[in-house]
Amino acid sequence: MMRRLALFGLAALLVAGCDKDEEVDPPAELVDVKPTIQVKELWSTRIGDAGEHLRLSLGIAVDGDTLYVASHKGVVQAISAVDGRTRWRAETKLALSAGPGGGNGLVALGTSDGDVVALEAADGRQRWKARVSGEVLSAPLIAGDRVVVRTLDGRMRALSASDGRELWLVEELVPRLSLRGAAAPVVSGDVVICGFDTGKVVAVSLATGEALWQAQVSTPSGRTELERLADVDAAVRVSGDDVYAVGYQGRLVMLSLDSGQVWWGRDVSSYRGLALDDDQIYVSAADGAVIALKRRDGSVVWQQDGLHQRGLGTPAVDGSTVVVGDFEGYLHWLDRDTGRFVARERPGDTPIRTPVVGSGRLYALDIDGTLVAYTSSGADAAPGGV
């Protein structure tokens, strides 16, 4: 229980950047942006309570023209990406904390109580429910006939997609103090890759769970437990034979998919994550900077500091822009070439979860449960803003 309380307290400190009496490092005041692209809201809907103060990992899963979303109180919905209408609604009666993960006709979610539930993607009927060893705070990965789940106790396990039976289990040590969060597992071919609180990225066989390689992304250092935090809580990104990963108080690295060899590393601290395009990496740093780097060598292309300490989420690439949400419910569109602000919208006033792009649209979900779809045009216009 003490460790759980410490995690909540640290998370609040990281996002707010202040204590009870004074702001140690206050959030940046937003500068007005003269839009140089047109952003249009297509539709908006409410999905219900999303666990506003619990730092959960409830997001959006996109599968073709359907979005899957869930609330902390156990409601899962399939929503039309075209018009925002609900296609089906399922009442799980579970304290949902992570997901959905979607694919292969299945929608999977995790709970605060250590359950994983799998629903039929077509109609929301429950296929199975399985108990795992700890709270789930990252979206389950559906890969072939397996559902891979990472729990807060440092374990990653594969469950049968047909009935929820455990097929394999891998485990990493959990430091006495760590950030409240867990990296989502990612699959490439027959390899599952995931970050852990030890600062490692581990690759295992999807079929057997056999360890293939591990790489140290962030190395714990310092005299205090706080200084030694080195979690890799952000999902890795894979492109071709390259793996990109980032750790808190650590590095951004490019790894070889087949061996885990580190090709290059740069000092960057992030617990939110990365987005990629063909040439660049975009990262939301722990201090609120948005940084673009060259994929081939990690050299910095630009850094946008106008969102300092604004509790940024994971960035998303949307056409010729990169989009990131903040703790006050703003979505910021930045030019991919220069990092300048080109548009801003505010669908609500609570933190934005990771925006998701699909079929030329951007979908954003805030922790108050508001889901919004946007389309943008004119993204190739001359950049403006800061």
Image: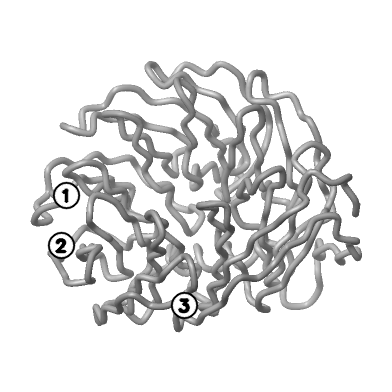
User: Where does label 1 land, which residue?
Assistant: 159
* Residue 92 spot, x, y in % from top left: 24, 78
The quadrant of the image that shows the N terminus is: bottom left
Q: Distance between the residues labelled 1 and 2?
A: 9 Å
At label 2, which amino acid type do we have?
Ala
Q: What element carries label 1?
A: strand
* Residue 204 spot, x, y in % from top left: 28, 30
User: Where does label 2 land, which residue?
Assistant: 130
The disc, 3 or 2, on the residue closer to the chain's N-terminal end is 3
Q: Is residue 143 left or right of residue 81?
A: left
| Residue drawn at 55 percent across, 34 percent down | 218
Local crowd size for mark 1, using a 10 Å CA cut-off: few (<14), some (14–19), many (≥20): many
* Residue 224 spot, x, y in % from top left: 59, 47
Q: Distance between the residues labelled 3 and 2?
A: 22 Å
Residue 51, label in figure: 3
Where is 46 relative to 201, above or below? below
> Do the residues bearing badges 3 and 2 touch, measured as CB atoms within 8 Å?
no
Q: Nearer the viewer, residue 106 or 27?
A: 106
Q: Give the quarter of the image for residue 221.
A: top right
The number of numbered discs placed on residues in the rendered structure image is 3
> Do the residues bearing badges 1 and 3 touch, measured as CB atoms within 8 Å?
no
Q: Nearer the viewer, residue 375 or 239?
A: 375
Q: What element carries label 2?
A: strand
Residue 271, label in figure: none
The disc, 1 or 3, on the residue closer to the chain's N-terminal end is 3
Q: In this view, does 122 lie to the left or right of 327?
A: left
| Residue drawn at 61 percent across, 70 percent down | 42
Q: Which of 88 and 5 is in front in this view?
A: 88
At label 1, which amino acid type do we have?
Leu
Local crowd size for mark 3, using a 10 Å CA cut-off: few (<14), some (14–19), many (≥20): some
